[in-house]
Image: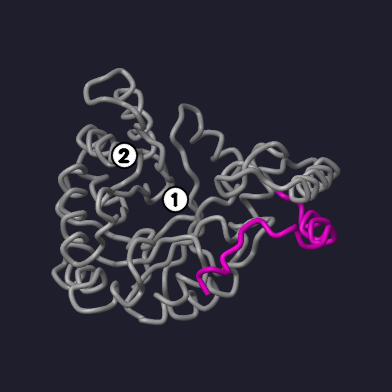
Amino acid sequence: MTLNVSPLTLGTSGLGRNSLPGSAEETAAVHIAVDLLSSEHTFVDTSNSYAGGRSESVIGRALRQVGEESRYRVISKVDCDPETGAFGRDRVLRSFDETKAKLGVDRLPLLHFHDPYSVSFEEAVGRRGALEALIELRESGQVDAIGIAAGPVPMIERYLQTQVFDAVLCHNRYTLVDQSAASMFAAAKEQGLTVFNAAPFGSGLLAKGPGSQYHYAPASEELQAWVAKAIDVCAEHEVTLPAVALHFSLRNANIDSTIVGVVSPGRLQQLNDLHAEVVPDEVWGAIAALGSAPAAIDDSQYR
């Protein structure tokens, strides 16, 4: 099935991190979640493991404030057991139960199989594996759709070959400096899947510029130099690098929704402003003229 998504999906990976129940920090995080759930964007994206489980708990409190109409605007992910790494059928069902309890909902529009690094593909697709549980949840009506969410493109492509998923989420692999997910996104779209592209700013570099990280690690000097040239191109056309980075994802017809993290006050308005910013067509040719950016991520171990 194809989900009815908006161009932007609001991510919450750091929402409520290090906050305690009933604390002022939790209350501040709940206020942010209320803003997300009250926005014009269709979905808020979370996970059982985000912020040590606090993201879902904070969103659950916000849902109780905003009311019934936002109950099914949250999409989440099942995660492996944080202590043992177990990620079979039983763990998937437990993870989903934990998610429902924290959010205070009885079903979800979409549930992703998240970062399956602790199990082999054969274990995940075999008897009593994770996929067995995900299919059960969909067939029982507890979730409307199931997806695969991870980073490495070769890993995701292998799971998509099973043809059991309704959606795909890939992060940091379709940005101004890394388009390794492009063909996978095109194939998924052709198969009728809902396609999510996460982290269009590369975890910081394409929002803050040189000196920042890409994919949660220091960016190479060569990559930072390429980004510095891209900033010059943006300045020549009177547009910002973050706006160009965001619209690079938004303009791809194979991407249904771009996921951007929003976990601090004012960030939602900043994102809306970037979304509204007009990027001249000439920018794309000028960016292309810079040539390919130096490789940012090596996924060869997953091939």
Q: Nearer the viewer, residue 212 or 174?
A: 212
**Which disc, if any, is residue 162?**
none
Nearer the N terminus, badge 2 or badge 1? 1
Q: Main secondary structure of the magenta part?
A: loop
**Mark 1 residue type:** Thr
Q: Is residue 193 visible?
A: yes
The x, y position of residue 171, in whole percent, is 51, 57
Residue at image coords 46%, 38%: 262
Residue at image coords 29%, 77%: 125
- Is 29 in the magenta? no
How far is mark 2 from mark 1, CA to CA?
A: 21 Å
The x, y position of residue 207, in whole percent, is 64, 40
- Is 284 in the magenta? yes
Label 1 element class: strand
10 Å crowding of disc 1: few (<14), some (14-19), many (20+): many
Residue at image coords 79%, 43%: 228
Q: Is residue 139 left or right of residue 152?
A: left
10 Å crowding of disc 2: few (<14), some (14-19), many (20+): some
Q: Please name the residue that numbered disc 2 is placed on.
A: 52
**Mark 2 residue type:** Gly
Region of the chain picked out in magenta, as a range = 279-303
| Residue 263, placed above or below residue 260 | above
Label 2 element class: helix
